[in-house]
Amino acid sequence: MNVEQARFNMIEQQIRPWDVLDSGILSLLAMVRREDFVPPAYKALAFVDTEVPLPAGQCMLAPRVEARLLQEAHVQRHERVLEIGAGSGFMAALLAHRAQSVVSLELEPALVKMASDNLRRAGVANASVRQADGSKGLPGEAPFDVIMLSGSVAVVPQALLDQLKVGGRLVGIVGGEPVMRAVKITRTAERQFDTVALFDTVVPALQGFEAPTRFTF
């Protein structure tokens, strides 16, 4: 496989047509080696428009979904980012190139190790992965400028919204199958949040985020 041609095709045929037009994001996707974050058994899927299986039933999101979420977060160089769901570490690596620092919370020990190892090999020094329940966030180190959910949740926990700075953004995918929507929630004042719907998609749920109980009568 011609890796650079495959990377170029991913950007031009999958990502750009999905309204990812920020030249900084496109350049970043050309530079960060996605194939180095894909499990060896799935290297052939590194640039394919699909989710890539990871241990413990988790997955890397499709490239176009990752790219769109990253673009919508508008991460700035001085900002601190909290990621929920480390996966293979790829999103943390992308975020780290835009931010001052990134902390990624991951429940699954195998993924904590995988993401940490991948970030180290890629030379990313300003991102760390911790084994923790992402639904509770990291209150001791809040507030954050950006919170990125790298998977879907039925509802966004108030505990996470409370850890945003005023002006901070949470970007993630909310809902249950078959209807999920990517949203950006901005904390506009101490007790005020503004939600913008971005696009519809369906992605696997993050671990540790319990869906609301469905009552049957």
Image (cartoon, grey):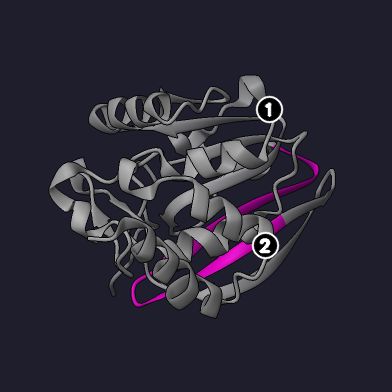
Q: Nearer the viewer, residue 212 or 197?
A: 197
Circle 1: residue type: Ala
Reading the image, the residue beneath label 2 is 23
* Front position among marks 1 and 2: 2
Toward the right, the furthest residue is 189
Local packing at callout 1 (Cα closer than 10 Å; few below 14, some 14-19, many 20+) is some
Q: Would you say residue 180 sits in the magenta stretch?
A: yes
Q: Nearer the viewer, residue 56 or 178?
A: 56
- In magenta, the rendered stretch is 164-185
Q: Nearer the viewer, residue 58 or 140?
A: 58
| Whole-number angstrom distance, CA of label 1 to CA of label 2 | 30 Å
Find residue 74 and name its label.
none
Q: Position of residue 171 (x, y in %)?
A: 60, 55
Reading the image, the residue beneath label 1 is 142
Q: Position of residue 20 (x, y in %)?
A: 60, 70
Quarter of the N terminus within the rendering: bottom left
When asked about the image quadrant of residue 201, the answer is: bottom left
